[in-house]
Image (tube, rainbow, N blue to C red):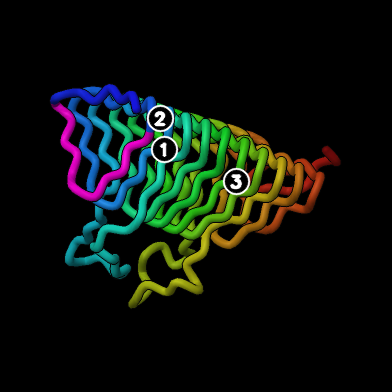
Amino acid sequence: MEQKISDTAIIYPGVTIGDHVVIHDYVVIYPEVVIQDGVEIFDHCVIGKTPRTAGSSKRKVNQNYKKTIIGKETVLSVGCVIYTGTVIGEKTLLGDHASLREDCVVGSNCILARNVSVNYNTKIGDFTKIMDNTHITGNVLIEDHVFISVLVATTNDNLIGKGSAFDEVREVGPHIKHGATIGAAANILPAVTVGVNAIVGAGSVVTKDVPDEKVVMGIPARVVREV
């Protein structure tokens, strides 16, 4: 078993590390994390972190450590933060300072580029690419072979945080289906479905469902043509 683990890394009891793993300086790995074979983790990454809330937070969080898995040959670039309970597939790349909150699932052969943030309980399929500075909100479903460009924003609460309590049923993010493309700086509102192979134009605000194989543009986004 060959591993290269920096002397400055902090690895808690209960961590499992596979063969041919490289862990660089100042990495912190919390309990219940499984690092599979061939993973490389760059400087200052934090893996298996438990969530915390502020006094004003309406959503309750579980602060216990849960199984967190980093799949074979995945690369975590500088400063990534992976919360507990998240599972990342094989041969996926997370760019510098990408962040994944608790209980997320990311498929294999994905790219989550620099400064991408993914909130809680979100599922991302295989071969999906999410570009720099995009925010994926909580309770989102993104299927396989999706491309999401830079500066895209997704939301999951039409009350904009003014509800009296967190509602797991009501506060649901978008569902982006297989092969869809989201242009730069688009905004996708709560509970919207973007159809199979659909295209959302740059800067659009998507307030209602996008049919399969259609191109939408504008504010609000409207169908302009077939793909």
Which callout, 1 or 3, points at the residue further toward the start of the chain? Answer: 1
Q: CA distance from mark 1 to mark 3?
A: 19 Å
The quadrant in which the C terminus is found is: top right
Label 1 close to label 2 by CB (< 8 Å): yes
Q: For label 3, count other residues whose C-alpha is less than 10 Å away and answer few (under 14), some (14-19) or many (20+).
A: many
Q: For label 2, count other residues whose C-alpha is less than 10 Å away and answer few (under 14), some (14-19) or many (20+).
A: many
Q: Give residue 29's quadrant in the image.
A: top left
**Relative to 31, is 101 on the left or the right?**
right
Question: Residue 147 location, x and y as percent?
Answer: 62, 35
Q: Give residue 9's quadrant in the image.
A: top left
Q: Tell me if I can see residue 114 in this picture.
A: no
Asked if the magenta segment contains residue 95, the reply would be no
Label drawn at residue 36? 1
Q: Relative to 158, say whether 89 is above or below.
A: above
Label 3 close to label 2 by CB (< 8 Å): no
Question: Residue 188 location, x and y as percent?
Answer: 57, 50
Q: Amino acid at mark 3?
A: Gly
Q: Residue at x 38, y 30 (%)?
A: 19
Question: Residue 88 location, x and y as percent?
Answer: 46, 43
**Relative to 39, is 13 on the left or the right?**
left
Which residue corresponds to mark 2? Answer: 39
Asked if the magenta segment contains residue 17, the reply would be yes
Q: Amino acid at mark 2?
A: Val
| Residue closer to the observer: 90 or 133 | 90
Q: CA distance from mark 3 to mark 2?
A: 20 Å
Question: Residue 18 location, x and y as percent?
Answer: 37, 35
Query: Magenta segment range?
Result: 8-18
Q: CA distance from mark 1 to mark 2?
A: 6 Å
Q: Secondary structure at mark 1?
A: loop
Q: Residue at x 35, y 55 (%)?
A: 67
Label drawn at residue 125? 3
| Residue closer to the observer: 52 or 103 | 103
